[in-house]
Every structure is written in structure tokens, then in C-alpha cells.
Image: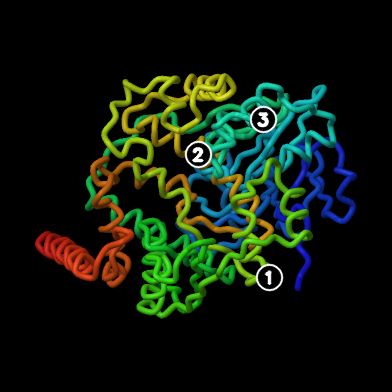
Amino acid sequence: MTDVPLHRNQFALGPDFATRFPGWQRVEAGRAGRLTVHPSLAVTQANSSGRALTLLGFALHSEKPDLSDYEVLRTLLGTFTDWTALMAGLGPLGGRWCVIAEMDGEVRLFTDAAGLRQVMYAPVEGTVWCASQAHVLAEALGFAFDPEALSFAASPAILDAPDYWWPGDRTPYSGIRRLLPNHFLDLKTGECRRFWPVEALSPLPLEVVVPRASRRLSQLVQAAARRFELSLSLTAGWDSRLVLAASREVADRIQSTTVQLIGMRPDNRDLQIAARLARAGGLSHTIVPVGENLRPGFRAAYWQSATAAHAHWAPDAQALFDHYQLSRVAMTGSASEIARCFYHSDPVPAASVTPESLCDLIGMSHHPFARKALAVWWADCPRLPGYHPLDLLYWEQRAGSWLAMCQAEFDCAWRDIFTPYNCRSLLIEMLAAPESSRRAPGYALYFQMICALWPEMVQEPINPPVRSSLPQQIRQQAASWRQLLRAQFDRSGEK
């Protein structure tokens, strides 16, 4: 069995190479400094006429799915006439990446839409250091734990929450911050600045959003399938169902996986429905059971590779590592909640949101560490028509912290992780749909996108009640088909 390598898919950036990683790639990045990169993480560079781009990770173009990483950079360089043009050019990119851009003496670092190729940074005596994990910076540069962060870590917000995360741009260390989604890092000054959104979002009807977003999502999946051997993490829920529907054109190249969590019965809805969906779509399906005991070697690698790693996720990561041995890229439905009104499933007027209410919404009580961090984020959060601040809360806080931490920890289990929803242009299109269509119980936007992409995928109920009886399941399936037929009838009437 393959040994678990430490720090997979990680990097460090600074004025010097990181000497603690002697076997890693060493890459000169111009004025940005020197990159020390784990062998598992791809590095791609391109330059033209005084402009230079360095890509860490992989980038997929949602409008040009045939492009390689290098071709994506060349396409960006073709429009990189100024910083505004570059930032617009990053919008259609999916994948999991960060881009270092240099022009006219300025150097800036950008992450993918949800910040899933996470970046921690620390200004030090006129220089800027960055790394994938905060503890790497802390150990190399001598940063101490933040006393208020330690108090927060001992509070119910962490101790009673197995899926805990850090609020705002904070980390456990004084002086080390996390680069938030929709912000860039100035690598000369160490200043973090928001670059999106800067203008109102015009609402669009479903008949406009559905074909646009469906096409973009499908092309992202096709782009990934051209590059990687994919394993779709499949459940009975909305998010993975839509990703499955978007996989129709490449279904013969994709496996599906459902993790059987500790204590999960064989008749669990995720296991049963996922298996039937895979069978209907012609995908192979694997159930990966999770054991309770961690091997000492895996436990050590897991904890040493990630800052404040989650014990709750370690058994799942070990089971996936044992099964796939780093041979596949996971394809997940994560980050979709950005468009699903996660924090306002019941309508919440944007004007009623306060910094104090944010702590209650995200379940962090009112610990001073969380209050201060969220107050800083709230002061920076734009109030623009078309964008509900609670959607941006999920995007920049929960996805940018909790989900980014999760994916970094699961780098020890997969070759890499691909999240099709992690594309700013796609998320903008989905957020432009009527809010009512993005809300439970019907999720009309999602239902219509599934129907547009692969209508057979609504034959199985979506998130049925855990103890639903067979007659209930039949009624739910019949209701799904009635909705499908109604949608098809409405479309045919428009022709």
C-alpha cells in the first residue's frame, strides 16, 4: 500500500525557497519571489511583453473546455491589457488554482472562485510570505498562537462542532491571515483587497439562466474528464445530482463513489439512491465503507499536513486513500450551496442582517474572536442590488474557510479535488435566477437544470425523508415526473 505523503498539493512562496522541504520543486516566480512546491502540485508559467502568469494547480475554461493549463494562461495573457481585464478573464475559470500575475512592477495573487486552493499569508519586514497551511508559515517564521484564537478554539463554537471553521480571514496565529474568495493579495505590500463584486447583478428569468448555466456546468465537467480520471461523489442530494446530470456526455469515463460513514445502515438513502442512479446512467458505482480505527502512519500524516485538522474527517479520508491510492480526482457537488440560499432558506431582508446576527446564523455564538472577525468581513461586504449578503456570507466564509479546509485535508486521499460549481461566471449566472427558484423545497433552478441536462436523473427521489415508506417514495417519484412533464410542455409551447 502506498505510504501517505506529507503536505500533498501544497506550496510556499516567499523571498527565499523553503528549506524545510528539500525534495520539492523550486520555481522562480519573478517579482513574486520563489516558489517551493510539492511534487504533486502542477506549476505552469507563461509570459508575454512584460506580463507574466504563474498557475498553481489546474484551471479549466468553462467556455473553451479543450484548453490545457498552459493554453488557459496564454488565453489570459491575450486579454491581460490591464488588471480589470485580467480579473474579468478569471471569471470563466473553474478548477482549483491560484494565479500569480505580474505587470508593470505590480504583483498580485488570485485564487479560484471559492478559494479552494487556499492561501495563507503573512507580511514580514517588507516582504510577503504565503503557504497552503498556516502552521507552515508559523513554524518557519516564528509566529505565535493568537490568545483570542486559542480561547475561541476552547469554546463551544469549536468543541461542540466537529465541522468547525475559522471566521473572517483569521487563523489560529497572530499575524497570519487567509486570503478570502473574491479578494486578491498584493505581493509587494501584503495588502488584501476585494475585487468582486463591484456592480449590481441584474435578475434573469429561469428560461434564460437554465440553458446558460447548464451549458457552462456541462463544459466544466467535460473539460475535467478530458484531463483526469474522475470519481463523482454521489449522494441522494441536489448538488451531486446536478453534477451527475452535467456528466451525461462523459458518463462512460466517470466512476461514482458513495462513502458509507460509520454507523450508516446499508439501506441508507444515499447508498441506495446513488447506486440506482449510477446504474441508470451507466456509471460504475463503488461504496467505500469507513472504519473506526486510524492507522498510526495515516493519523500522523493527516495531522501534520493540515493546520488544526478535523478528527471528524480523518476516517473518511483514510478509507478513500486506501481504496483509490491517489489514482483519481474527486468530483464533488460542494460550493453549490452558495446559490441555494443556505443562510436564508426562509426569506431574510438584506437590511435586517447585522454583524451580531451573523454569529447566530453560522452557529459561532458570540465569542469575541468570531464577533470581531465577522464584523471586519461585514464592513467589507458590498451592498449591491442582486446580491444577498447571506449568499456572499456562505461564499466567502463557509466555502472559503470550512470547504477549503476540508479539501486541503482530503488532499491526502485523492490525487486532487474538482468542484464544478467553483467558477465565478457559473455562480453569477445561478445567483441571477429568482431567489424563490433557489430555495427549498422545490429548488426549481436545480430541477430544471437537471431536466435540461439529463432528465432521467429525476426518476429517483431527491433527498427523500429518511424513513419514507415505499408508497411515499412512489408519490415523490410521480411528483418529480409531473414537474418534468410540465417543464417540457412549457418549453414546447414556447417554440
Left or right, 285 with reference to 295: left
Q: Which mark is residue 177?
A: 3
State the SS at label 1.
Answer: loop
Residue type at tag 3:
Arg
- Which is more N-terminal, label 2 or label 1? 1
**Pointer 3: residues within 10 angstroms few (<14), some, or many (20+)?**
many
Q: Nearer the viewer, residue 381 or 127?
A: 381
Residue 436: image quadrant is top left
- Please state if 344 lies on the left or on the right of 175 as rendered: left
Q: Residue 125 versus residue 345: which sits nearer the camera?
A: 345
Q: Which mark is residue 325?
A: 1
Note whether residue 61 is visible: yes
Residue 195, image x and y in percent?
A: 52, 31
Whichever of labels 1 and 3 marks the residue nearer the N terminus, that label is: 3
x then y, percent, for residue 91: 49, 45
Disc 2 residue type (three-letter): Arg
Residue bearing mark 2? 398
Mark 1–mark 2 distance (CA, rounded to whole Å): 29 Å
Q: Is residue 218 above or below residue 312?
A: below
| Label ID, residue 405 | none
Q: Residue at the spot x=31%, y=39% of the render?
A: 345
Q: CA distance from mark 2 to mark 3?
A: 16 Å
Label 1 or label 3, whichever lies nearer to me, is 1
